[in-house]
Image (cartoon, helix red, strand yellow):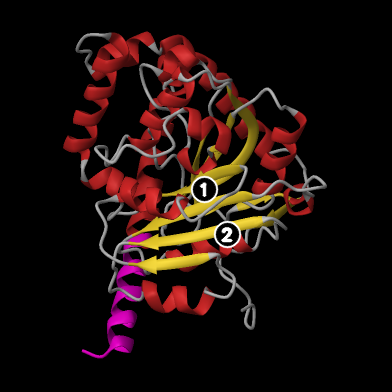
């Protein structure tokens, strides 16, 4: 089968999958509507945390406040280093790269560290190589190893990483740089996330309240694609990702930052989009993911702790989350200028 036929079949399969997801979402909405008919049903629906619910409503266009598109960086702008670890995401990686480059941030180092993909990723990287600080496609020891290799090629004052199926939202880098410049006492920041489907449509939001160091020792609710930190804090925390982790590597980094004295803050702005799809790593390897979470809780608590116990101890945080989630959803319905997020470049962009 030639590549064009293969791509057509993949496109058709994606369209069928998307339609099934729409039907599933509609059926879920009907079921939830019946449950909300009674007072108890409405209370249950309102009080259920949305963190961890990856498909919260039927697909909608991906919109952001128009003001996001007009966010200016500080002057002088600090250098920001972004690394994208990649493997087997040829169908999404151009969207990821474009979401970073289209920020128009003036002091950007952007490295893509691919693990040797044979799915068209390398062809995409070659098209963008003039705009990238660098890229490599070679076997590696996993995501943490790829990040360590990529970060070793950077020098920016501010650091972050973006997985090859996720997106940065418009204005994210300028907003982060301005915040960190205005708050020199803060070492790491993260924001809110939008949840998107394989066709770049919004299917939910992941809204967290103000940062809580104690909750961080119990569970990782931080939207990874919205996380940025200072290089000075990175170096104090060991200067590398722990490559014994394959799922909880960002949680481990956050805890090492905290334990080395870093001040971590949550910014009340949507900075990134987390893509939900059938082949993503976080859904496929749940057993290893849970084992790594148990390992971290044993370290932070000094004893084994089940996920249920950690969840129970996080309930005050989750109640605060519900308030922030409700406010965010209400704000999305206000008559405010909004723009659709472009996720692929216009013709002739390169």
Q: Which residue is mark 2?
A: 99
Q: Residue at x 36, y 41 (%)?
A: 28
Q: Quadrant of the C terminus?
A: bottom right
Q: Residue furthest bottom?
A: 2
Q: Position of residue 124 (x, y in %)?
A: 45, 75
Could you say which disc has been placed on residue 329 in the image? none
Q: Position of residue 6 (x, y in %)?
A: 27, 82
* Tag nearer the camera, 1 or 2: 2
Q: 254 or 268: which is nearer to us?
A: 254
Q: 166 or 5: which is nearer to us?
A: 166
Q: Mark 1, residues whose alpha carbon is within 10 Å: few (<14), some, or many (≥20)? A: many
Q: Position of residue 122 (x, y in %)?
A: 38, 75
| Most common secondary structure along the magenta stretch | helix
Local secondary structure at mark 2 = helix
Q: Which residue is mark 1?
A: 273
Q: Residue at x 29, y 39 (%)?
A: 247
Q: Which residues are magenta?
A: 1-18
Magenta stretch: includes residue 3: yes
Local secondary structure at mark 1 = strand
């Amino acid at each position: 089968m030639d590549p064009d036929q293969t791509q057509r079949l993949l496109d058709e399969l994606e369209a069928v999958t998307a339609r099934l997801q729409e039907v599933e979402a509609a059926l879920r909405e009907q079921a939830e509507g019946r449950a909300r008919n009674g007072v108890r049903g409405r209370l249950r629906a309102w009080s259920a945390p949305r963190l961890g619910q990856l498909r919260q409503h039927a697909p909608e266009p991906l919109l952001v406040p128009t003001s996001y598109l007009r966010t200016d960086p500080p002057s002088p702008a600090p250098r920001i280093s972004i690394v994208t670890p990649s493997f087997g995401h040829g169908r999404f990686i151009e969207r990821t790269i474009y979401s970073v480059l289209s920020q128009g941030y003036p002091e950007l180092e952007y490295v893509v560290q691919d693990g040797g993909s044979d799915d068209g990723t390398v062809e995409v990287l070659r098209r963008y190589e003039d705009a990238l600080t660098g890229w490599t496609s070679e076997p590696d020891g996993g995501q943490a190893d790829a990040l360590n290799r990529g970060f070793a090629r950077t020098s920016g004052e501010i650091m972050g990483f973006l997985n090859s199926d996720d997106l940065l939202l418009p204005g994210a880098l300028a907003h982060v740089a301005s915040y960190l410049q205005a708050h020199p006492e803060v070492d790491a920041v993260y924001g809110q996330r939008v949840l998107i489907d394989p066709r770049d449509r919004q299917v939910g939001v992941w809204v967290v309240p103000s940062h809580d160091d104690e909750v961080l020792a119990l569970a990782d609710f931080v939207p990874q694609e919205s996380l940025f930190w200072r290089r000075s804090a990175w170096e104090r925390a060991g200067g590398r990702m722990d490559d014994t982790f394959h799922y909880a590597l960002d949680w481990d980094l956050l805890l090492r930052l905290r334990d080395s004295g870093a001040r971590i803050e949550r910014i009340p702005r949507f900075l990134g989009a987390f893509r939900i799809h059938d082949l993503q790593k976080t859904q496929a390897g749940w057993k290893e993911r849970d084992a790594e979470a148990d390992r971290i809780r044993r370290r932070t608590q000094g004893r084994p702790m089940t996920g249920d116990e950690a969840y129970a101890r996080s309930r005050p945080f989750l109640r605060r989350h519900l308030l922030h989630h409700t406010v965010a959803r209400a704000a999305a319905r206000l008559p405010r200028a909004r723009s659709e997020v472009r996720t692929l470049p216009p013709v002739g962009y390169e």
